[in-house]
Amino acid sequence: MDLTEITGKYILSEGLPYCQPVTRGHINDTMILKYADNDKFILQRINDKVFNAEQLMHNIMLVTEFIRHKAEERGGNPDKECLTIVKTKDGKPFVHTSDGYFRIYRYIEGVSYQAVEKEEDFYKCAQAFGSFANSLAEFDATQLFEVIPKFHDTEKRFRDFLSSLEKDVCGRAKDVQKEINFVLERKDYCNRITSLLHDGTIPVRCTHNDTKLNNVIFDEITGESLAVVDLDTVMPGSICYDFGDAIRFGCNTAKEDEIDLSVVHFDINLFRAFVKGYLSSIGNGITDIERKNLAFSAILMTYECGMRFLTDHLNGDKYFRITRENHNLDRARTQFKLIEEMEKILPEMEKIVEDNK
Ligand SMILES: Nc1ncnc2c1ncn2[C@@H]1O[C@H](COP(=O)(O)OP(=O)(O)OP(=O)(O)O)[C@@H](O)[C@H]1O
Ligand SMILES: [Mg+2]
């Protein structure tokens, strides 16, 4: 990548920047650009193999401008509370060179964490996603492109699963009957949220779709959460998906691909912390019916994810990268273990949500 070819398209700061790669991200190539006058920016290559870069930047422009406006209305600091796209000299939100698509954001001073170490951090992470949803409560999500079509269409995911099962291209189905039955027995989960969306019982909202701790920037000194980043997957959907996926990922006591299932548990204390943080900041960004479906959504998102891992195992590991034999099967099993635990305590999870409304 020719850095000056990219930065030359912008008016940033005087001189040449010092470049520091951010190695944490898996999807984008991310770099911090530091200038002599202390101005800092984030330069990212947009993954245009996975995404349509222009549609994705259209989505991010609309969402960041909306949040910015809301932050200004509240008397907040938009540069700290939300991503700010730096436009090129000719007003474009990205640069297209022979090396791909690139974008520049203002740098938000702070830190991000890979794993939950304290419950308090998870609570604050939830507050950040709650405020994100709150800021977007009145946003018209139908303006957004579906950058990954049917991402959380669980009914379609189920049909894909059945088709892979029928083809059984690697002959693996016979060895995973227990897991296959686990998915089949829960078929009725698939349309619970999609049907509410389709008949308008719950609104189509702008969802983040990657509600992980490492996509929140924290103030290093106060420890408070500042902003939500990584908006590549903002799309129309249900708010229940964002909540459910945050729980699926964040309340697992073990790694997503842990082989020893005896260490895989659903952590109800982390669930409580997330619910508290999320509902304390979401305000009018959620309706009663959406709220009543939050706890179930944690099961649904875990089911959908587990089903996708199992489907990929049946397909011969074509989608999720594997580094060992049965890797996707191991991943599916951790998800199914979490589901079994959540199913047993769903009434308790629902009560926690109700107690925090
Ligand atoms: N505007 C910003 N200001 C400060 N730090 C940022 C900014 N944007 C991104 N980062 C940092 O860079 C990291 C990677 O960015 P981002 O999440 O957009 O990339 P990614 O490749 O999609 O990552 P992942 O796959 O881990 O979600 C973030 O976790 C965050 O620490
Ligand atoms: Mg990220």
Image: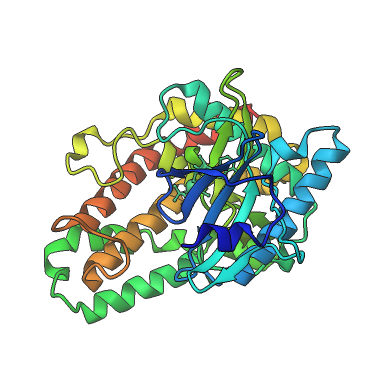
Q: How far across and down, in percent of the image, does residue 133 sit?
A: 68, 45
Q: How is the image coloured?
A: rainbow
**Position of residue 327 measured from the top left corner of the image (x, y, whole percent):** 20, 55
Q: Identify the residue at horizontal 14%, vertical 69% (top origin).
A: 172
Q: Name the one closer to the observer, 277 or 195.
A: 277
Residue pictured at 23% horizontal, 33% vertical: 263
Determine whether, in the image, residue 167 is placed left or right of residue 146. left
Q: Quadrant of residue 341?
A: top left
Residue closest to the eye, 74 or 304: 74
Query: Which residue is nearer to you in this view: 165 or 191?
Result: 165
Examine the rendering and report whether any part of residue 23 can be seen.
yes
Q: Is residue 235 above or below residue 170?
A: above
**Residue 206 image position (x, y, % from top left):** 67, 56
Position of 68 relative to 186 (above/below) = above
Question: Where is residue 188 shown, x and y percent of the image?
Answer: 44, 62
Q: Residue furthest top?
A: 222
